[in-house]
Image (cartoon, rainbow, N blue to C red):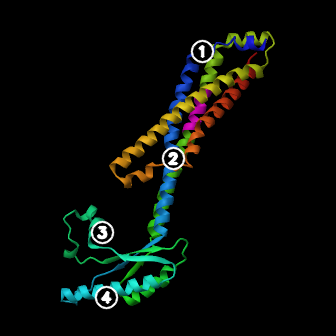
Protein backbone atom coordinates (compact mmCIF):
# COMPACT_ATOMS: atom_id res chain seq x y z
CA UNK A 1 0.00 0.00 0.00
CA UNK A 2 2.86 2.31 0.73
CA UNK A 3 4.26 2.08 -2.79
CA UNK A 4 0.83 2.59 -4.38
CA UNK A 5 0.18 5.62 -2.17
CA UNK A 6 3.60 7.08 -3.00
CA UNK A 7 2.84 6.85 -6.70
CA UNK A 8 -0.44 8.74 -6.33
CA UNK A 9 1.13 12.24 -6.10
CA UNK A 10 2.26 13.19 -9.65
CA UNK A 11 5.15 15.51 -8.84
CA UNK A 12 6.23 15.47 -12.48
CA UNK A 13 3.15 17.53 -13.40
CA UNK A 14 4.00 20.27 -10.91
CA UNK A 15 5.52 23.31 -12.74
CA UNK A 16 7.12 24.59 -9.55
CA UNK A 17 8.72 21.20 -8.96
CA UNK A 18 10.25 21.18 -12.44
CA UNK A 19 11.63 24.68 -11.98
CA UNK A 20 13.10 24.12 -8.51
CA UNK A 21 16.27 22.23 -9.62
CA UNK A 22 17.08 25.04 -12.04
CA UNK A 23 16.63 27.69 -9.34
CA UNK A 24 18.80 25.73 -6.91
CA UNK A 25 21.37 25.16 -9.65
CA UNK A 26 21.63 28.87 -10.41
CA UNK A 27 21.90 29.78 -6.74
CA UNK A 28 24.51 27.07 -6.18
CA UNK A 29 26.49 28.50 -9.09
CA UNK A 30 26.47 31.96 -7.53
CA UNK A 31 27.28 30.57 -4.09
CA UNK A 32 30.07 28.45 -5.57
CA UNK A 33 31.69 31.45 -7.23
CA UNK A 34 31.46 33.48 -4.02
CA UNK A 35 32.87 30.61 -1.94
CA UNK A 36 35.66 29.99 -4.44
CA UNK A 37 36.52 33.70 -4.33
CA UNK A 38 36.67 33.65 -0.54
CA UNK A 39 38.88 30.55 -0.53
CA UNK A 40 41.16 31.96 -3.22
CA UNK A 41 41.50 35.22 -1.30
CA UNK A 42 42.42 33.28 1.83
CA UNK A 43 45.18 31.45 -0.06
CA UNK A 44 46.31 34.71 -1.69
CA UNK A 45 46.46 36.52 1.65
CA UNK A 46 48.35 33.66 3.26
CA UNK A 47 50.93 33.57 0.46
CA UNK A 48 51.44 37.32 0.41
CA UNK A 49 51.61 37.60 4.18
CA UNK A 50 54.13 34.76 4.38
CA UNK A 51 56.18 36.28 1.58
CA UNK A 52 56.27 39.69 3.26
CA UNK A 53 57.01 38.16 6.67
CA UNK A 54 60.08 36.37 5.31
CA UNK A 55 61.64 39.46 3.77
CA UNK A 56 62.75 42.99 4.55
CA UNK A 57 63.95 45.92 2.50
CA UNK A 58 66.74 48.37 3.30
CA UNK A 59 66.64 51.79 1.68
CA UNK A 60 69.85 53.83 1.54
CA UNK A 61 69.27 57.41 0.35
CA UNK A 62 71.81 59.08 -1.96
CA UNK A 63 74.23 61.65 -0.47
CA UNK A 64 72.93 65.17 0.05
CA UNK A 65 73.67 68.05 -2.30
CA UNK A 66 76.72 68.91 -0.17
CA UNK A 67 78.68 66.31 -2.16
CA UNK A 68 79.32 68.21 -5.39
CA UNK A 69 81.38 65.57 -7.22
CA UNK A 70 79.02 62.91 -8.70
CA UNK A 71 81.78 60.31 -8.68
CA UNK A 72 82.50 60.98 -5.02
CA UNK A 73 78.82 60.78 -4.20
CA UNK A 74 78.54 57.45 -6.02
CA UNK A 75 81.58 56.11 -4.21
CA UNK A 76 80.14 57.21 -0.88
CA UNK A 77 76.87 55.47 -1.67
CA UNK A 78 78.69 52.29 -2.73
CA UNK A 79 80.63 52.28 0.53
CA UNK A 80 77.41 52.64 2.52
CA UNK A 81 75.89 49.71 0.63
CA UNK A 82 78.95 47.56 1.43
CA UNK A 83 78.74 48.43 5.14
CA UNK A 84 75.04 47.68 5.31
CA UNK A 85 75.48 44.38 3.45
CA UNK A 86 78.15 43.32 5.94
CA UNK A 87 75.86 44.08 8.89
CA UNK A 88 72.94 42.23 7.30
CA UNK A 89 74.91 39.13 6.35
CA UNK A 90 76.36 38.88 9.86
CA UNK A 91 72.96 39.27 11.56
CA UNK A 92 71.44 36.05 12.95
CA UNK A 93 68.32 34.93 11.10
CA UNK A 94 69.23 36.63 7.81
CA UNK A 95 69.41 34.08 5.00
CA UNK A 96 70.69 36.52 2.40
CA UNK A 97 70.94 40.15 1.40
CA UNK A 98 71.44 41.43 -2.14
CA UNK A 99 71.30 44.96 -3.58
CA UNK A 100 68.82 45.53 -6.36
CA UNK A 101 70.39 46.21 -9.74
CA UNK A 102 69.46 49.17 -11.88
CA UNK A 103 67.23 47.04 -14.09
CA UNK A 104 65.31 45.80 -11.07
CA UNK A 105 64.79 49.35 -9.84
CA UNK A 106 63.62 50.31 -13.33
CA UNK A 107 61.08 47.45 -13.28
CA UNK A 108 59.75 48.59 -9.88
CA UNK A 109 59.29 52.20 -11.00
CA UNK A 110 58.13 51.54 -14.56
CA UNK A 111 54.39 51.25 -13.70
CA UNK A 112 54.47 54.80 -12.29
CA UNK A 113 57.19 56.58 -14.29
CA UNK A 114 57.10 54.77 -17.64
CA UNK A 115 59.53 52.53 -19.49
CA UNK A 116 61.92 55.31 -20.58
CA UNK A 117 63.18 55.86 -17.03
CA UNK A 118 66.95 55.76 -16.55
CA UNK A 119 67.76 55.05 -12.87
CA UNK A 120 71.13 56.77 -13.27
CA UNK A 121 69.41 60.04 -14.22
CA UNK A 122 67.59 60.36 -10.88
CA UNK A 123 68.91 60.55 -7.31
CA UNK A 124 67.29 57.25 -6.40
CA UNK A 125 68.03 55.42 -3.16
CA UNK A 126 69.80 52.09 -3.17
CA UNK A 127 67.58 49.19 -2.26
CA UNK A 128 68.72 45.96 -0.61
CA UNK A 129 66.43 42.92 -0.54
CA UNK A 130 66.79 40.91 2.66
CA UNK A 131 65.64 37.29 2.93
CA UNK A 132 65.05 35.81 6.37
CA UNK A 133 65.30 32.25 7.61
CA UNK A 134 62.02 30.46 8.23
CA UNK A 135 60.73 31.37 11.67
CA UNK A 136 63.55 33.81 12.30
CA UNK A 137 62.93 36.14 15.25
CA UNK A 138 64.55 39.44 14.32
CA UNK A 139 63.98 42.73 16.10
CA UNK A 140 63.65 45.29 13.27
CA UNK A 141 64.29 48.17 15.68
CA UNK A 142 67.68 46.87 16.81
CA UNK A 143 68.80 45.87 13.34
CA UNK A 144 67.53 49.15 11.89
CA UNK A 145 69.54 51.10 14.47
CA UNK A 146 72.74 49.27 13.51
CA UNK A 147 72.10 49.96 9.84
CA UNK A 148 71.38 53.66 10.46
CA UNK A 149 74.61 53.96 12.45
CA UNK A 150 76.61 52.51 9.55
CA UNK A 151 74.77 54.47 6.86
CA UNK A 152 73.09 57.66 8.13
CA UNK A 153 69.59 58.01 6.71
CA UNK A 154 69.23 54.32 5.86
CA UNK A 155 65.95 52.70 6.88
CA UNK A 156 64.84 49.11 7.38
CA UNK A 157 61.28 48.21 6.32
CA UNK A 158 59.90 44.92 7.66
CA UNK A 159 56.68 45.34 5.60
CA UNK A 160 54.62 45.14 8.77
CA UNK A 161 52.33 48.02 7.80
CA UNK A 162 51.77 46.71 4.29
CA UNK A 163 51.17 43.20 5.60
CA UNK A 164 48.62 44.38 8.16
CA UNK A 165 46.74 46.48 5.61
CA UNK A 166 46.75 43.70 3.03
CA UNK A 167 45.52 41.07 5.46
CA UNK A 168 42.79 43.38 6.76
CA UNK A 169 41.61 44.27 3.26
CA UNK A 170 41.57 40.69 2.00
CA UNK A 171 39.91 39.56 5.24
CA UNK A 172 37.10 42.05 4.63
CA UNK A 173 36.68 40.72 1.08
CA UNK A 174 36.50 37.16 2.44
CA UNK A 175 33.75 38.18 4.86
CA UNK A 176 31.80 39.73 2.00
CA UNK A 177 32.21 36.55 -0.06
CA UNK A 178 31.04 34.31 2.78
CA UNK A 179 28.10 36.65 3.43
CA UNK A 180 27.08 36.29 -0.22
CA UNK A 181 27.25 32.50 0.17
CA UNK A 182 25.03 32.64 3.26
CA UNK A 183 22.47 34.93 1.58
CA UNK A 184 22.30 32.78 -1.55
CA UNK A 185 21.92 29.57 0.45
CA UNK A 186 19.08 31.11 2.46
CA UNK A 187 17.49 32.29 -0.78
CA UNK A 188 17.66 28.73 -2.11
CA UNK A 189 15.95 27.44 1.03
CA UNK A 190 13.26 30.09 0.62
CA UNK A 191 12.72 29.02 -2.98
CA UNK A 192 12.21 25.44 -1.81
CA UNK A 193 9.65 26.62 0.76
CA UNK A 194 7.61 28.44 -1.87
CA UNK A 195 7.92 25.54 -4.32
CA UNK A 196 6.72 23.14 -1.62
CA UNK A 197 3.77 25.36 -0.79
CA UNK A 198 2.91 25.48 -4.46
CA UNK A 199 3.09 21.70 -4.60
CA UNK A 200 0.79 21.40 -1.60
CA UNK A 201 -1.79 23.61 -3.29
CA UNK A 202 -1.46 21.78 -6.60
CA UNK A 203 -1.89 18.35 -4.99
CA UNK A 204 -4.37 19.41 -2.32
CA UNK A 205 -7.05 16.94 -3.42
CA UNK A 206 -4.58 14.07 -3.59
CA UNK A 207 -3.34 14.85 -0.09
CA UNK A 208 -6.91 14.86 1.24
CA UNK A 209 -7.48 11.47 -0.40
CA UNK A 210 -4.33 10.09 1.21
CA UNK A 211 -5.57 11.30 4.58
CA UNK A 212 -8.89 9.55 3.99
CA UNK A 213 -7.21 6.20 3.33
CA UNK A 214 -5.14 6.54 6.49
CA UNK A 215 -1.85 8.12 5.34
CA UNK A 216 -0.09 10.01 8.13
CA UNK A 217 1.34 13.52 7.89
CA UNK A 218 4.82 12.08 8.19
CA UNK A 219 4.20 9.78 5.22
CA UNK A 220 3.04 12.67 3.05
CA UNK A 221 5.91 14.85 4.23
CA UNK A 222 8.43 12.16 3.27
CA UNK A 223 7.21 12.30 -0.33
CA UNK A 224 7.82 16.05 -0.52
CA UNK A 225 11.13 15.65 1.30
CA UNK A 226 12.30 13.11 -1.25
CA UNK A 227 11.40 15.38 -4.14
CA UNK A 228 13.12 18.34 -2.49
CA UNK A 229 16.20 16.25 -1.79
CA UNK A 230 16.41 15.16 -5.43
CA UNK A 231 15.92 18.74 -6.61
CA UNK A 232 18.62 19.96 -4.22
CA UNK A 233 21.10 17.31 -5.37
CA UNK A 234 20.41 17.85 -9.06
CA UNK A 235 20.60 21.61 -8.84
CA UNK A 236 23.53 21.55 -6.42
CA UNK A 237 25.67 19.20 -8.51
CA UNK A 238 24.90 21.08 -11.71
CA UNK A 239 25.51 24.50 -10.20
CA UNK A 240 28.77 23.61 -8.46
CA UNK A 241 30.03 21.86 -11.61
CA UNK A 242 29.52 24.98 -13.68
CA UNK A 243 31.07 27.10 -10.92
CA UNK A 244 34.14 24.82 -10.81
CA UNK A 245 34.54 25.00 -14.58
CA UNK A 246 34.21 28.79 -14.41
CA UNK A 247 36.92 29.02 -11.74
CA UNK A 248 39.22 26.77 -13.77
CA UNK A 249 38.56 28.83 -16.88
CA UNK A 250 39.30 32.10 -15.08
CA UNK A 251 42.50 30.63 -13.68
CA UNK A 252 43.64 29.49 -17.14
CA UNK A 253 42.79 32.86 -18.67
CA UNK A 254 44.66 34.67 -15.90
CA UNK A 255 47.66 32.37 -16.31
CA UNK A 256 47.70 33.10 -20.05
CA UNK A 257 47.57 36.84 -19.36
CA UNK A 258 50.42 36.76 -16.84
CA UNK A 259 51.68 34.58 -14.00
CA UNK A 260 51.14 37.35 -11.44
CA UNK A 261 47.42 37.46 -12.22
CA UNK A 262 46.89 33.73 -11.71
CA UNK A 263 47.59 33.58 -7.99
CA UNK A 264 44.34 35.06 -6.63
CA UNK A 265 42.24 32.93 -9.02
CA UNK A 266 43.71 29.51 -8.26
CA UNK A 267 42.31 27.29 -5.52
CA UNK A 268 44.47 25.07 -3.38
CA UNK A 269 43.89 21.33 -3.50
CA UNK A 270 42.43 21.48 0.02
CA UNK A 271 39.86 24.07 -1.13
CA UNK A 272 38.16 21.90 -3.73
CA UNK A 273 36.56 19.50 -1.19
CA UNK A 274 35.05 22.54 0.55
CA UNK A 275 33.54 23.66 -2.74
CA UNK A 276 32.30 20.12 -3.39
CA UNK A 277 30.27 20.21 -0.16
CA UNK A 278 27.85 22.79 -1.60
CA UNK A 279 25.52 20.24 -3.29
CA UNK A 280 25.20 18.32 -0.02
CA UNK A 281 24.43 21.56 1.83
CA UNK A 282 21.82 22.54 -0.75
CA UNK A 283 20.22 19.08 -0.67
CA UNK A 284 20.09 19.02 3.13
CA UNK A 285 18.57 22.50 3.34
CA UNK A 286 16.03 21.60 0.67
CA UNK A 287 15.13 18.44 2.60
CA UNK A 288 14.68 20.28 5.89
CA UNK A 289 12.83 23.22 4.34
CA UNK A 290 10.38 20.90 2.57
CA UNK A 291 9.72 18.84 5.69
CA UNK A 292 9.13 21.88 7.88
CA UNK A 293 6.85 23.47 5.31
CA UNK A 294 4.76 20.34 4.75
CA UNK A 295 4.38 19.47 8.42
CA UNK A 296 3.29 23.00 9.35
CA UNK A 297 0.86 23.17 6.44
CA UNK A 298 -0.67 19.75 7.14
CA UNK A 299 -1.28 20.66 10.78
CA UNK A 300 -3.43 23.59 9.62
CA UNK A 301 -5.44 21.46 7.22
CA UNK A 302 -8.91 20.43 8.49
- Rendered-image quadrant of the N terminus: top right
Mark closer to the observer (2, 1):
1
Q: Secondary structure at mark 3?
A: helix
Callouts 1 and 3 close, C-beta under 8 Å = no
Q: Secondary structure at mark 4?
A: helix
Which comes sooner in the sequence, label 1 or label 3? 1
Cα separation, mark 3 vs mark 2, equals 36 Å
Callouts 3 and 4 close, C-beta under 8 Å = no
Cα separation, mark 1 vs mark 3, equals 66 Å
Mark closer to the observer (1, 3):
3
Q: Residues within 10 Å of mark 1 (few under 14, many from 20)?
A: few
Disc 1: which residue? 12
How far across and down, in percent of the image, does residue 275 sit? 56, 42
Which comes sooner in the sequence, label 2 or label 1? 1
Disc 2: which residue? 177
Instruction: Point out the stretch of residues depicted in magenta.
Output: 184-193
Disc 3: which residue? 104
Q: Is residue 236 above or below residue 178?
A: above
Quick check: 281 left or right of 162?
Answer: right
Amino acid sequence: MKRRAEAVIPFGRDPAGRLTPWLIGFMTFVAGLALAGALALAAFAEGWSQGLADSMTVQIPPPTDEVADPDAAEAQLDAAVVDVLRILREAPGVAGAEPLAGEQVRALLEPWLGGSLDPASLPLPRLIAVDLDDGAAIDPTVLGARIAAAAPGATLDDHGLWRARLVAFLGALQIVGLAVVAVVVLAAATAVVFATRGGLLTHHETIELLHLIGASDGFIARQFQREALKAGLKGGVGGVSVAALTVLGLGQAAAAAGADLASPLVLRLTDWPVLALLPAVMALLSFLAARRTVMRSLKRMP
